[in-house]
Amino acid sequence: MKGRSWYTETFDETGAYLATAHVTVVARNLITGLDGRVVWYAYVSQTDEFRYDHDQFIFAREERELPWLQFEEVNASGAQTSIGAPYTWRVPLRSAIFAHVRGTIDVVDNVGNVRQQTTIGRIQDEHDAGPQPDGVYEDTTISHSIPTLIPGGQWMWRTAETYLSGDHDEGMQLGHTSNRFNPVTGDLDYTAARAEIAGNVPSFEFDGGDSAESYVFPRLQLIEASTKFDE
C-alpha cells in the first residue's frame, strides 16, 4: 500500500475545485510462507469521481462515505473471499453542483490480470436524493479481457482476447479482438478483429450498374493484421 495514490483533488488558482477522485483498494492475501510472512497483492476495485461545475462553482461542505480498503484471502482452490467489512473514508464534496461518476474493476485473477471491468457512468448529481443502488444503472459498458500464458518459459502473460458488452449489445461481443503471440518471444504475431452487424443487414440503393445493385453487405467481416519481427 505504501506510495499508492487513492485520493486526489483538483482545483485552480482561485480555489475553485474542478474534481475530487477516490479509489477503493483491495489487498489480497495470496499465500502465507512457512515462516509466517504473507504475500499480498493490492489492486483498485472501484473508482469514484465527483466532477464539479467549473463555470458556476458553489462551495459546499458535504461528505460521502465510500469504501476505502477491503481485505481478501485466497482458499486452496484459488477462490477469493472477503475478510470482514471494508474500511471506509468520508470524502469531502467540494461543490453544490456536481456529477458522481463511478467505475468498477470486477474480476482480477491471482496473478494480477484484470479480466472484467465496468464503466457505470453517472450515478448521482445534485438533483438526486442519493446514489442509485447497485444493479439498476443504465447504459453500463463492460470490458472483458482473456489472458493467456505464453508456452515459452511459462512466465509471460499476454492478452488473448478482448471485447465489450453492455445493456444494448444485442447479445454480441462488441469489438471482439483476438491475438496470437510468438510462443518463444511473446511478440504479437497476428490480430483479428470482428466487424459484425446485429439484427437485419442494412440494404443499399445504388444508381450504378447491376454489379453494384447485387452487392450483399456481409454480416460478419474479419479485419486481420500480422506482424513479423527481424531475427
Image: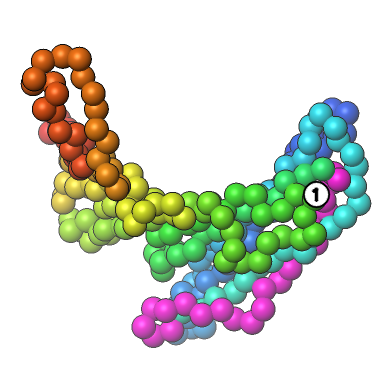
The answer to whether residue 218 is magenta is: no
- Quadrant of res 18: top right
Q: Which residue is mark 1?
A: 126
Whether residue 229 is visible, yes or no, is yes
- Residue 92 location (% of width, % of height): 83, 53
Q: Name the dominant secondary structure of the magenta segment.
A: strand
Quick one: label 1, few (<14), some, or many (20+) residues within 10 Å? few
The residue under the point 78% across, 36% down is: 53
Segment colored magenta: 75-96
Looking at the rendered image, the quarter that the N terminus falls into is bottom right
Q: How many marks?
A: 1
Label 1, secondary structure: give it.
Answer: loop
x, y percent for residue 181: 19, 47
Closer to the camera in the image, 210 or 157: 210
Instruction: Estimate the x, y position of residue 141 in percent, counting from the top left.
Output: 48, 51
The residue positioned 25% from the left and 59% from the top of the image is 149
Residue 50 in view, yes or no? no
**Residue at 56%, 55% in the rendered image:** 138
Residue 137 % position (x, y):
59, 59
Snapshot colouring: rainbow
